[in-house]
Image: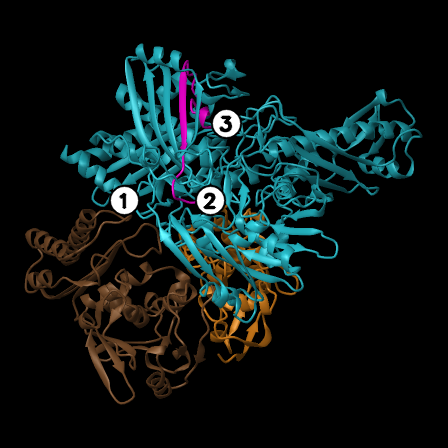
Chain colours: A orange, B brown, C cyan
Amino acid sequence: MENKTISVTVNGGSKASEVEPRRLLVHWIREALGLTGTHVGCDTSSCGACTVLLDGTPVKSCTMFAVQADGREVTTVEGLQQGGKLHPVQEGFKEEHGLQCGFCTPGMMLLGAALLEENPDPSEEDVRWAISGNLCRCTGYQNIVKSVQWAARKAASEQSGVNA
Amino acid sequence: MFPRSFDYLAPESMDDALSMLAEHGEDAKVLAGGQSLIPLMKLRFAAPDYIIDINRIPDLGSMHENGSLSVGALVRTHDIERSELIKDRYPAMAAAAPLISDPLVRNLGTVVGSLCHADPQGDWASVMLAMNAEIVCRTGESQRRIPVAEFVQGPFTTSLEPNEIATEVNIPDPGADTYGTYMKLERKVGDFASVGVAIHLSFDGPRVERAGIGLTAVGPANIKATEAEQLLTGAELDGGTIARAADLCAEAADPHSDLRGSADYKRAMVRVFVSRALSAATAGKAA
Amino acid sequence: MAVEEKEMPWVGRSVKRKEDDRFVRGGGNYLDDIRLANMLHMAILRSPFAHARIESIDTSAAEAVEGVVAVVTGELLAEHKLAWMPTLSGDTQAVLATDKVRFQGQEVACVVATDPYVAHDALELIDVEYEPLPVVVDPKKAVEDGAPIIRDDKEDQKDNRIYHWEAGDKESTDRAFSEADVVVELDTHYPRSHPAPLECCGCIADVNPATSKTMIYMTSQAPHAIRTVFALVTGLPEQNIQIISPDIGGGFGNKVPVYPGYVVATAASLLIGQPVKWIEDRTGNLASTGFARDFHMHGELALKQDGTMLGLRVGMLSDQGYAYADAQPSKFKAGLFHVVTGSYDMPAAHVVTDGAYTNKAPGGVAYRCSFRITEASFLIERLVQNAAYELGMEPVELRRRNFVRPEQFPYTSVTGFVYDSGEYAKALDVALEKSGYEQLRAEQERLRAEGRLLGIGVASFTEAVGAGPSRDYDILGIKMFDSAELRIHPTGKAILKLGVKSQGQGHETTFAQIVAGELGIPPEDVTVQEGDTDNTPYGLGTYASRSTPTGGAATAVVARKLRDKAKQIAAHTLEVSADDLEWEGDRFYVKGAPEQAATIQDIAFAAYTNHPQGMEAGLEGVTYYDPPNLTYPFGTYVVAVEVDAQTGEWKVRKVVAVDDCGVRINPMIVEGQIMGGLTEGFAMSAMQQITFDEDGNCMGSNFIDYLLPTAWETPTFELHATVTPSPHHPIGAKGVGESATVGSPAAFANAVVDALAHLGVRNIDMPLTSGKVWEAMQQARSS
């Protein structure tokens, strides 16, 4: 079985490597790139611990082969912060106790960040719907919702700060 | 979690894809959204020698209306969910889209891929049965159109030949005055259907001009409730007609008992959903 | 607001979690994130049959796969006397099957390879010949005469009975029942469930052939106890075994026991001389490790017509699977299930429990509960509601009438528990007021008239958490105390090392706050370390809501010891008598001269630079804390649901939770624990269950069949508190991690049953699926 050479923009930087076609994207991210913030929580595409953004859209990286990502852009949790400054969603999770064990957190935060790109002021229902493909066993979700909404307010205040 | 080895082919044209498929036939699987295929491969329930990834073929992701609606093989469920055209003209599709799996799976999973997967618990086939859609299939030399009712043959079985690629699903013009919905009983959001009912009605004044009903997860494949469709065609939706149609649909269902509920329960839910949907359609007419 | 917050004492303040920064950056260090040089990967072959004799195992094709280093079978382990291992309740279970497989999913062989993909390729090539045997899935049939004997490997095991254990008093209970006006009965099955933390189990075993040092990175809630068990099982010297539990992606009881994967990986590393990583997949997790519950319960409650409770009779049959593998005190065979009298002043009770072997995965762990207390709480709270229907009483008034009253504490229950403190009626009152209970009842009446089904369920639970005391509580003979070691360095910064182990509970913050509360060292200056057996004092680990009652108490006690020493040092540096010093917050000052003071940081510096002659230098200590009693958190939950009369689906309208866990160290974290627990209570009542078909095939071995709630179904919770300190805990705190899982399932189930109560429905077993609710309505309407 022939290996393929792929080139993927990961968190803004180009990453090229040779990869067996059967390698799942999540394994490539974790093993080849050493980005271990993307997790594996199930075998059946059910939990979303492996969520990454593919060209800005949330996908389950356990349900894609790495070769499919060739030529595309992937954002993982490690790419959320910019220049050492946390993304508002990351701050929100700290402020609103949006995590306990932290295992689902990278996926949840990426969903939150993607949601805010589309909808800067999401309702509780909007957030619950957006994260409904991902499982959390610790928080009961309520503080995750609050964390994303905290981030929305923070982003809005930063925006108005810039405008003012 | 760890699929078997395979060779990966990424054609950039449909002709290339078809010739690869002609060469490898049953040893190959076509990969579109991958949201049904890859989970099977991870569990090693499927282990093709070749994967033909059609995602690099241009134009398969388009959706356009020209006498009928063409939905290309790379149109994602998420595309349906956010389409204004679908919301305005194809309400059964609009109702079904957000009920299919979860938001991330919908971002990749395709309508055509779901139809080809032919899971009896799959939702799209019922919607397409209700809308009398056809699958457009291509081989190297020819193209054919297969009504969804003939395309879906049984659990995980379609009439697609090993050398054929389903390039689009084609949905007839619903007419100007329509009603449609999809109702789904699920144990939690994103679950496979315990029971699903797709309904599409085209009206001519107070009368139903065309009726389509598809049932999910209550038989070895999705069921087209033809007797109920016939009853409704040309009828006005009064209480008696609705009750009779709901009964006919319940009779058409052939569910089995499992952890989701007894066969009686599932049959009863078909009745409830059909009745609710038709009543809602009437309410729309009254308004 | 911010200013007020700053002036609050450290204990009681919602300090943001110290651990979060690494997690939000993707910098958590979970087991699978650890990679060692030359590390190999292990995969497990599992039995497709629930009961079968192994005729032969051919591993030759698997061994021939390029990249495969070894294939381990039970036969190989047997040569090293490792084919079987003890469970945490004193039974045995197979590491890898030798004679028979006894449940579907049992570990049969392991492949060790250079890559996990290759290991799975090789698994497919192992050829095992099985001869299927009759399968026992029903524990009631398992204990009948003539049932196939599952544990024929045990010489003295002549049937499928594991234990028979009784609590309370039969005679006085029989008498109470003979005097009763009303007896209410309930038969219910608390279904088999699984904690299913989002991270599965796993380990990396690294046996250094040159030094014989055995490093095991392991997803363990109890690393010290596991090390001791490992030393006993393998014969390796305990000081050469180091277990490190890194960040854990949730535990909930799943990560307490020893699992075959840990043992095989260690044996493989020992034989091969390279590190071996085993990461459980989700199917393995759900099908083989750490199931919970599965109690078949019968309850009878005897009452007077006025609602006074007279006695409680309980029979319980536990389906343990093929091995009795609970982690629980050896004295109590069904854990703390005998706390089943709940929040009520019950004059008499008799509890009879039996355990049975079946062809299912071994267990069962206490899933987010203190040794089987969840099942007990569920039974009594369901019984009380049904008794209220029978008596025509308002369910909350029946509860109120029978609560243990505040002046009765410490209250000794008829089954032997000594409840430390409680104000049950107060918590109930807050819950009723905040939920608008009266209005809900009125609305229920109104909606019923329209044919709509609103149900209101209440549960007033009491837990017993925080084991020890060591006189009653042990795991395999190891007494259940816990420990804390505190070192204050010259610059006044501290390291606190604990025998417990966080899996998301926020120990790095909460325990730092306890130190801050006792010594005034700000939490950010206190680093909390856990989970490394070589570098933390011995402890029994984190489960049964025991970390705050034991580890938290140890922390307060050791901090107070250091404060005593600090006083002597302060007296020396301030040149006054120790008797003339007062402590305030973070300093000792001279009585009447507050400007003459030494802060804890001054004192710490002096401890290393200017300590009194004759005193040991330094400022550090260790405490092993043996609690005098359990702690008894309590509360009342009110749940309102609306049931769809046509489909049986139900939606939660309102959840109001009033919890009293004594003093709250970090209210934000406490509320996080409660919301998580409520979610799991909802999940068990609504969807979580693992069932088996008649051939013993597991019907819940992945997240498509074993349902966990998402954000969409999970209700919004409204939380309130009352505070009744524990009289014996150094800072008055009780455990809280499990309260909501213990208390809430009954509230949800009660609500759904209440919606249908006027139709005559009295019970629907969990999970209350729409199909079951619909069947119950059909039956009620037809009868």
Residue B135 at x, y = what percent?
A: 24, 76
Amino acid bearing label 3 = Phe
User: Is A125 in front, or is B211?
Assistant: B211
| Mark 1 element type | helix
N-term mark: 2 or 3: 2
Mark 3 residue crowding within 10 angstroms, few (<14) / some (14–19) / many (20+): some
Against A106, residue C419 (above or below) is: above
Which residue is denoted by mark 3 in the rendering? C332
Which residue is denoted by mark 1 in the rendering? C770
In the picture, measured across the screen, residue C315 lies left or right of residue C269, that is: left
Q: Which residues are magenta?
A: C337-361
Q: Chain of mark 1?
A: C
Which residue is denoted by mark 2 in the rendering? C195
Please say whether residue C360 is one of the residues in the magenta stretch: yes
Residue placed furthest toward the right: C613
Mark 3 or mark 1, which is nearer to you? Answer: 3
User: Is B190 in front, or is C170?
Assistant: C170
Give the image quarter of residue C439.
Answer: top left
In the picture, measured across the screen, residue B172 lies left or right of residue C405, that is: left
Q: Chain of mark 3?
A: C
Amino acid bearing label 1 = Ser
| Mark 2 element type | loop
User: Is C198 in front, or is C698?
Assistant: C698
